[in-house]
């Protein structure tokens, strides 16, 4: 899976449909990032950090976000 061009400088990508956050550095085919981009229901975070995504009530994706990741 290639990183979406629009997010080449971002690591964390949120799915607004299910409030999941994906780690683009570790995304797998199961994350289906291409389908998420096609849906246009995504969000970037500023600052681009997992704690910011959690602050916005996004839950980590079980496929690409391992437990203790804080950056």
Image (cartoon, rainbow, N blue to C red):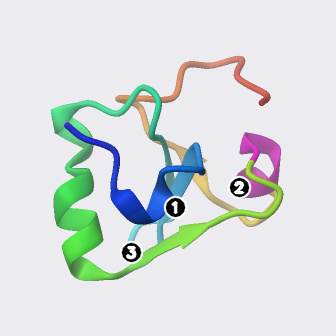
3D distance between C-alphas at marks 2 and 3: 14 Å
Residue 10 vs 68, above or below: the answer is: below
N-terminal label among 1 and 2: 1
> Which residue is at 33% across, 55% downward?
4
* Residue located at (71% from left, 55% from top): 53
Q: Quadrant of the N terminus?
A: top left
Mark linked to residue 53: 2
Query: Mark 1: few, some, or many residues within 10 Å (few <14, many ≥20)?
Result: many
Pointers 1 and 3 in contact (C-beta within 8 Å): no
User: How far from the left and from the top, in percent, is residue 39?
Assistant: 24, 79
* Secondary structure, magenta segment, majority class: helix
Q: Which residue is mark 1?
A: 14
Q: Which mark is drawn over residue 62?
A: none
11 left or right of 42 in image: right
SS label for mark 1: strand
The part of the chain drawn in magenta is 49-54
Identity of the residue drawn at 71% across and 17% down: 68
Quarter of the rendering containing residue 64: top left
* Residue 58 image position (x, y, % from top left): 62, 58
Task: State left or right for residue 49 relative to residue 5.
Answer: right
Q: Nearer the viewer, mark 1 or mark 3?
A: 1
Residue 14 within the magenta-colored segment of the rendering: no
Residue 52 on image: x %, y %: 81, 54
Mark 3: give few (<14), some (14-19) or many (20+) Cα within 10 Å.
few
Mark closest to the chain's N terminus, 2 or 3: 3
- Say which element carries label 2: helix
20 versus 29 height, above or below = below
Task: Please tell me whether mark 2 or mark 3 is closer to you in this view.
Answer: 2
Q: Where is 50 relative to 57, above or below?
A: above
Q: Could you tell me residue 56's position as x and y percent?
A: 75, 66
Q: Quadrant of the C terminus?
A: top right
The residue identified by callout 3 is 17
């Amino acid at each position: 899976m290639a990183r979406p061009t629009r997010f080449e400088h971002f690591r964390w990508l949120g799915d607004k449909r299910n409030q999941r956050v994906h780690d683009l550095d570790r995304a797998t085919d199961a994350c289906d990032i291409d389908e998420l981009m096609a849906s246009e229901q995504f969000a970037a975070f500023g600052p681009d950090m997992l704690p910011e995504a959690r602050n916005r009530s996004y839950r980590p994706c079980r496929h690409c976000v391992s437990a203790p990741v804080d950056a």
